[in-house]
Image (cartoon, grey):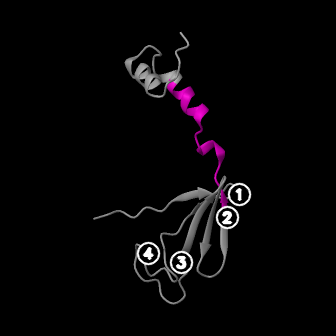
Amino acid sequence: MAKAYILNIKDTSGNWVGIPTLIGQKGEKGLNGAKGVDGVGITNIIQQDKKLIIDLSNNTRKEFTIPSADLPNGVDILNKITREVPTNSPSITNFKTHLNIPSTT
């Protein structure tokens, strides 16, 4: 049996908020089936810069700021590789060769 997961994110006040697992005008296509005539579904979800924007079928919009600490960037990834992988390891050598990165040693 498949498990249903609900994604939680922090809103602009720092509170954790669940994103409903509903889609469709009334949530009728959600994981839990029909929600009835008073249900509200998600009509669109987009990411714009560091915001997650959710349009609902009742013509409302919810915006959440995605904390930048949760979004790794190239520097974070490079620092992790540098700290955790010996610079002379075959995997780093292959990685540098593949990406055409000149050796600094």
Task: Verify CB contact (< 8 Å) between mark 3 and mark 4.
Answer: yes
Amino acid at the residue labelled 3: Gly
Label 2 belongs to which residue?
A: 63
Q: Is tag 3's residue or tag 2's residue first in the polypeptide sequence?
A: 3
The answer to if 69 sits in the magenta stretch is: yes
Residue 14 against residue 90 in the figure, above or below: below
- Establish if 13 lies above or below 42: above
What residue occupies the far bottom of the structure in this picture?
A: 37
Which secondary structure, mark 3? Answer: loop
| Residue 84 rendering spot, x and y as whole percentages | 48, 23
Q: Going by the image, does 32 lie left or right of 59? A: left
Residue lying furthest front: 100
Q: Secondary structure at mark 1?
A: loop
Q: Amino acid at mark 1?
A: Thr
Q: Residue at x 43, y 19 (%)?
A: 93
The residue that mark 3 highlights is 41
Q: Amino acid at mark 2?
A: Glu
Decide which of tag 3 and tag 4 comes sooner along the chain: 4
Sequence order check, earlier mark of 4 and 1: 1
